[in-house]
Amino acid sequence: MSTLKIGLFGCGCVGGGLYEVLNQTRQLPAVIHKIVVKDPSKKRQVPSSLISFHKEEILDDPAIDIVVELINDSDAAYHIVCDALKKGKHVVSANKKLIAEHLDELILLAKSNGVSFLYEGAVGGSIPVIRNLEEYYNNDTLSSIEGIINGTTNFILTKGNEGIGYAEALAEAQLKGFAEADPTLDVDGFDAKFKLVLLLKHAFGLTTTPDEVFNTGIRHIKQQDIAFAREKGYRIKLIGHGHKLPSGVAGFVAPQFIKNQHPAYFVDNEFNAIIVQAAFADKQLFIGKGAGSFPTASAVLSDISAIQYQYQYEYRKSDTPTNKLTPDFHLHAYIGSASLDDVHSVPMDVTDSVFSSKEYSYKTGQISFQQLRKTDWLEQKQLSLILLPQGIVS
Ligand SMILES: NC(=O)c1ccc[n+]([C@@H]2O[C@H](COP(=O)([O-])OP(=O)(O)OC[C@H]3O[C@@H](n4cnc5c(N)ncnc54)[C@H](OP(=O)(O)O)[C@@H]3O)[C@@H](O)[C@H]2O)c1
């Protein structure tokens, strides 16, 4: 077997991890030929002979077979990935934002140039979910895929369940390198949404974009909401949902109270959990580190290894008739706020309970998803929206 030559873009958390992991994986015939990074003033752990600051040194080098794109700038990554595919190089990426925003275009580019485009590291870090959806569940009809697909928010919520406030938990997540200086993409559910777009494609053959998928995050969850959870024996988790309904697929990201029977109840800190419900295989749970240098690099390594035997995703579920998103369902939800008027301003089709005290108020009931996604009262009034354990009412 000939040795694959890799051109690596990015040598930060994941790229640096990949360099280490490849050095320790002698049995894989693949070597890093060149590493392109951005900042010439940075000290590096890798030999300086490998480093370049010019993307052409990878893209125009005919000796390089695979481009591994691990940079933290999705616009620059888009151009790198497109150029690499057009030049007939296989591409491995972990950039969920880039892939979710341009998936069909990139699939087409890879196909028309006869190369592989793989991205296991983009969803669930070390969890091998994309290849399982492609291969293992290829002939099994899935009715749902859901789970914790953002490690940062799971870390913050875990600390919340231990009594630590949002700001303190976020600061700790940033200190540990789980959260970016600007945590918006994580805490507001965007990162989970990018990953959900990829899961929906591989689980249901559903083509969608981040703009079409509703997300709300954990920013407005308050101590009183956590106290409510504790009193009921629930935990709060940010869940990416994909459920097949008669009218299509319900796909969205929102926090949810879950009970201790839920498979993700005990999945804490930066761990991710993905639950697949299949017609024949029934319910299955995947757990693993959803982020971090070596866990993510291990998924990238697995993609590089798969390219060694010409592996490509087939997207075989893309022709199924239910491959569209539906807004036609209701959610069991909890709405909390310091103001009872604000709580009452949220239109619910069925109200199950209302609680009000001087400090805090909430109500629970059923809300139409159509209503939920077209209003901006969540942000304006900084309300807590948390799904109840029953989740979807179809
Ligand atoms: N970190 C995780 O746990 C994790 C998990 C799953 C997926 N991912 C994804 O993996 C990718 C990399 O994340 P990371 O955490 O490794 O990022 P990171 O630690 O911030 O490192 C980013 C790297 O990209 C380089 N870079 C930025 N712009 C560049 C450009 N235009 N050309 C060449 N190099 C450029 C930087 O160069 P300098 O070194 O010169 O600054 C740096 O080496 C992202 O798409 C991220 O979403 C990360």
Image: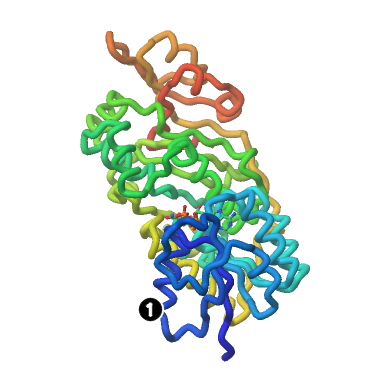
Q: Looking at numbered disc 1 in the image, what kind of residue is underneath it? A: Gln
Disc 1 within 8 angstroms of ligand 1 (CB): no
Quadrant housing the N terminus: bottom right
Residue 139 seen in the figure: no
Task: Report the residue that reaches farthest toward the right.
Answer: 112
Residue for point 64% across, 38% down: 211
Q: Position of residue 318 (x, y in %)?
A: 68, 58
**Is 56 located above or below residue 123 in the figure?**
below
Task: Give the total of numbered labels.
Answer: 1
Could you tell whether 253 is left or right of 79 in the image? left
- The local crowd at label 1, few if under 14, some if 14 to 19, many if 20 or more residues have their Cα within 10 Å, is few
Nearest the eye: 148 or 301: 301
Residue for point 58% across, 79% down: 5
Nearest the eye: 93 or 242: 93
Nearest the eye: 132 or 322: 132
Residue 20 sits in which quadrant? bottom left
Residue for point 51% across, 74% down: 49
- The residue beneath circle 1 is 24
Nearest the eye: 63 or 129: 63
Task: Report the residue that reaches farthest toward the bottom.
Answer: 1
Residue 95 sits in which quadrant? bottom right
Residue for point 43% across, 27% down: 385
Q: Position of residue 167 (x, y in %)?
A: 32, 31
